[in-house]
Image (tube, helix red, strand yellow):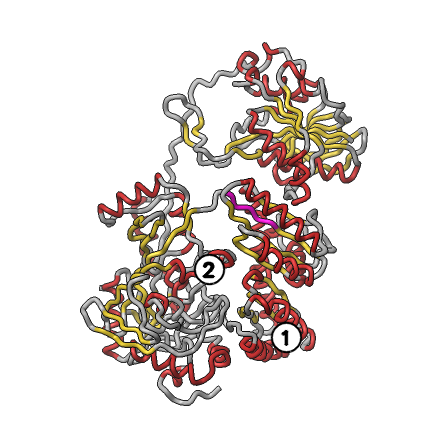
């Protein structure tokens, strides 16, 4: 079974700050990392491959440095990687991104299953998986907690829904988006890292995947960012130290201060 | 001034530490300043009351457990006091009760509460924030340890393999002596003349001290006083187990953080392969900063814990065939350098009968967290197992050896441990700092008889380790629990010399009663073993 896993590069830290002039993220020189949800998606794909055979391909869209992350996926066991990298992709919202990712299928072998992380830790939209399925005209199951059964033709999963869980079956090919806890990602081995260093990565431009440039990047993005800002956190915490009676006195002091 | 309180039920917790020994005391104080310490010392001296000094009570040798008298708890002396640069290095001044994890966080985030700092220190803090990344290299597993306690027992950790023990990073100390006088010592300024050390207090009073005459083992060592010809005065107080004075301020050296830090867990089918691998890595891998070991027993406990507790469900699975694991941490200047070392590790594995496929390489923050979780879960799971058994038989506690030998004896000592454990039919889990030939051999008693046999075995090991030129305590300190081993290691004569030296600084035998030697030995009487 051929499986495609979509990978997003996200900032390495959650403590990002915004440039007050340009409203863009200050990357603070820290390296970007693979979106943690996507690492779990890769692990699920590798487990399915161990069960059914086939190949796992990782796909990302981003700046040339993203090859570093794709190579990490190869070291963890993916068979091949493709990076979509072109100025034409810059400034893409989720619609333009999912269109561009879907165009990669113009040049990749047919995939039975596409696995995305449920969402990315920077954008939090959870839209790429469903939109990609829409662009490819195949079913999508989001919020997958467990793959219960999979054959060459069908997949049965347990997914989260409002107030509970559901067991869902779909015909393949399909897209699933997975939660982080679906699997604990394996670490690469020395052998994996050694092999990944020399493996070819397929880097493509918009033309290279036969994409319509008017639907890529900023041109293809109806979303406009009007303003971004850091929310003010008003919650404060205090560590109460001292002997039990001192701590009790402090708690009473806080209580009295609340005047309730 | 600090209050001296009766040690009521409310403070019972301060009579025990992580060694799970329980002591007793009549009074307790929580000094917040050096003046507070001097007040307590003066008061206790006037009343002839012994003082046990403690901080985070995370020690494993019961040095902080009081045997009567007064408990001086320094955990409220938890402020960072200033920072300075000298040459390329940074130095940070702290109170003894600063907790390791808080110190690390402040250094990492470069965020200091500078209230009360001098103008010079504040300027330096701004300069530090703009400088590269630095770290404090001493890394015991227990991050709630206090810096004062770490200095007092000359603590170590995994990275001691490359960076050495706590003493190397103590650049200055302030110490309140039993007569209330203050010593301000800076490394590189006061040296012994042969084995005679002359110290001068801030008020001009001098102390002439005869250092013990023994030769310390050529290994990682936290057994008894540091004593060497022409030694630096700072070294006498580092590792003195709270017996010579109260450390009221410490200056620590910080090092530039390596740009690339990777962790590699290497799995082997046989212990012999892991030992060959360790020796080869030691000789061939240039940038290893830690070399740690987990044996079959340790891995078995993890496998068991994973099935028992959801808290451990995220532990990565160790394949069934794997018998043991050597963890190597690399600290490099660049990725290319780290890759070179990584490939060399792979080659060494092959040469030792392993396979580089059987490794976990942690290069990202998430993978490093997973690997750290795995490493720290070993002692934690072992403690949980022992607690379980203790509920059935209260006599049972974990028996953990903390002994080290010189490099050439690694294989001999492991063979000896295995042979004697097998003869005694004891269940064990072995882990620790194999790079320093310093393994924590933990006996997991199933009943009181196992416990008794395990304890007897430890005494036998102390003898054998001494014969190999090793140390009976490599990092936990001697405290009260290992003083018999210290006697085995150095002999009665040198214990008497240690006690005599203590008396020159602490004539009333006020500090750390029962640490390093029995109170009778300190008084020059015959000790009953």
Identify the element where label 2 is drawn: loop
Relative to B233, say whether A149 is above or below. Answer: above
Q: Identify the residue shown where x is 59% and y is 17%.
A: A96
Residue B262 counted in the magenta span: yes
Identify the element where label 1 is drawn: loop
Q: Which residue is mark 2?
A: B164
Q: Position of residue B146 (x, y in %)?
A: 39, 60
Does residue B32 appear left or right of residue A98 in this picture?
left
**Mark 2 chain:** B
Instruction: Tell me, yes or no, whether dots 1 and 2 are on the same chain.
Output: yes
Q: Which residue is mark 1?
A: B447
Q: Please, which residue is most extreme toward the bottom here? A: B526
Q: Which mark is residue B88?
A: none
Residue A151 counted in the magenta span: no
Mark 2 crowdedness (10 Å alpha carbons): few <14, some 14-19, many ≥20: some
Does residue A150 appear left or right of residue B198 in this picture?
right
Name the mark nearer the viewer: 1 or 2. Answer: 2
Look at the magenta stretch and give its main secondary structure: strand
Q: Position of residue A58 (x, y in %)?
A: 67, 30
For the N terminus of chain B, the quadrant is bottom left
Q: Which residues are magenta?
A: B260-264
B367 or B22: which is nearer to us? B367
Q: Identify the residue shown where x is 62% and y is 51%.
A: B265
Observer able to see residue A145: no
Question: Do callouts 1 and 2 mark residues in contact (Cβ within 8 Å)?
Answer: no
Observer able to see residue A159: yes
Does residue A68 appear left or right of residue B102 in this picture?
right
A30 or A154: which is nearer to us? A30
How many marks can you see? 2
B11 or B296: which is nearer to us? B296
Q: Please, which residue is most extreme toward the left here? A: B203
Going from N to C along the chain, the mark reached first, 1 or 2, is 2
């Amino acid at each position: 079974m051929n499986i495609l896993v979509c990978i997003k590069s996200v900032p390495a830290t959650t403590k990002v700050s915004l440039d007050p002039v340009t409203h863009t993220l200050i990357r603070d020189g820290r390296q970007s990392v693979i979106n943690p949800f996507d690492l779990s998606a890769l692990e699920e794909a590798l487990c399915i491959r161990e069960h059914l055979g086939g190949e796992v391909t990782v796909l990302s869209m981003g700046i040339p440095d993203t090859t570093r992350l794709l190579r990490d996926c190869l070291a963890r066991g993916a068979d091949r990687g493709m990076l979509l990298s072109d100025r034409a992709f810059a400034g893409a919202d989720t619609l333009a991104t999912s269109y561009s990712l879907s165009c990669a299928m113009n040049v990749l072998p047919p995939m039975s299953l596409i696995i995305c992380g449920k969402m990315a830790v920077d954008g939090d939209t959870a839209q790429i998986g469903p939109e990609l399925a829409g662009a490819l005209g195949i079913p999508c199951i989001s919020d997958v907690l467990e793959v219960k059964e999979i054959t060459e033709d069908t997949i049965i999963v347990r997914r989260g829904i409002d107030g509970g869980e559901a067991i869902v079956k779909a015909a393949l090919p399909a897209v699933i988006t997975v939660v982080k806890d679906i699997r604990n990602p394996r670490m690469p081995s020395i052998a994996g890292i050694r092999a990944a260093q020399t493996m070819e990565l397929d880097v493509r431009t918009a033309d290279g995947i036969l994409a319509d440039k008017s639907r890529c990047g900023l041109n293809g993005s109806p979303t406009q960012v009007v303003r971004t800002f850091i929310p003010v956190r008003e919650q404060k915490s205090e560590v109460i130290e001292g002997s039990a009676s001192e701590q009790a006195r402090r708690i009473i002091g806080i209580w009295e201060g609340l005047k309730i | 001034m600090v209050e001296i309180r009766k040690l009521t039920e409310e403070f019972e917790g301060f009579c025990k530490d992580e060694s799970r020994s329980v002591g007793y005391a009549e009074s307790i104080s929580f000094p917040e300043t050096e003046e507070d310490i001097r007040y307590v010392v003066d008061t206790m001296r006037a009343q002839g009351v012994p003082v046990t000094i403690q901080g985070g009570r995370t020690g494993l040798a019961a040095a902080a457990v009081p045997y009567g008298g007064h408990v001086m708890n320094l955990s409220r002396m938890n402020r960072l006091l200033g920072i300075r640069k000298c040459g390329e290095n940074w130095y940070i001044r702290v109170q003894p009760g600063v907790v390791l994890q808080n110190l690390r966080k402040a250094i990492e985030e470069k965020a200091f509460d500078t209230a009360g700092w001098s103008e010079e220190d504040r300027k330096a803090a701004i300069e530090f924030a703009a400088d590269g990344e630095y770290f404090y290299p001493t890394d015991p597993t227990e991050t709630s340890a206090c810096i004062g306690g770490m200095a007092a027992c000359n603590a170590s950790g995994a990275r001691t393999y490359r960076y050495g023990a706590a003493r190397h990073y103590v650049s200055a100390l302030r110490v309140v002596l039993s007569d209330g006088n203050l010593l301000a010592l800076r490394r590189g300024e006061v040296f012994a003349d042969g084995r005679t050390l002359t110290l001068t207090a801030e008020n001009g009073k001098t102390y002439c001290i005869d250092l013990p005459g023994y030769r310390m083992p050529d290994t990682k060592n936290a057994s008894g006083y540091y004593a060497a010809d022409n030694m630096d005065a700072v070294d006498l107080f580092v590792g003195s187990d709270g017996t010579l004075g109260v450390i009221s301020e410490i200056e620590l050296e910080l090092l530039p953080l390596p740009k690339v830090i990777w962790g590699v867990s290497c799995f082997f089918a046989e212990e012999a392969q892991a030992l060959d691998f360790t020796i080869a890595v030691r000789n061939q891998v240039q940038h290893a900063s830690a070399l740690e070991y987990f044996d079959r027993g340790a891995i078995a406990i993890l496998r068991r814990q994973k099935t028992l507790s959801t808290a451990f469900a995220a532990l990565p699975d160790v394949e069934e065939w794997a018998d043991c694991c050597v963890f190597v941490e690399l600290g490099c200047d660049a990725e290319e350098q780290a890759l070179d070392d990584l490939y060399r590790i792979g080659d060494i594995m092959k040469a030792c009968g392993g396979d580089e496929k059987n490794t976990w390489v942690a290069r990202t923050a998430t993978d490093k967290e997973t690997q750290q979780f795995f490493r720290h879960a070993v002692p934690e799971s072992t403690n949980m197992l022992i607690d379980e058994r203790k509920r059935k038989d209260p006599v049972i506690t974990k028996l953990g050896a903390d002994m080290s030998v010189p490099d050439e004896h690694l294989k001999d000592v492991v063979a000896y441990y295995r042979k004697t454990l097998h003869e005694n039919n004891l269940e064990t889990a072995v882990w620790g700092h194999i790079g320093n030939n310093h393994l924590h051999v933990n006996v997991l008693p199933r009943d009181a008889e196992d416990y008794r046999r395990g304890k007897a075995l430890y005494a036998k090991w102390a003898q054998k380790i001494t014969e190999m030129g090793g140390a009976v305590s490599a990092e936990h300190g001697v405290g009260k629990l290992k003083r018999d081993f210290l006697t085995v290691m150095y002999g009665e004569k040198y214990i008497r010399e240690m006690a005599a030296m203590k008396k020159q600084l602490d004539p009333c035998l006020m500090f750390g009663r029962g640490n390093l030697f029995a109170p009778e030995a300190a008084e020059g009487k015959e000790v009953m073993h």
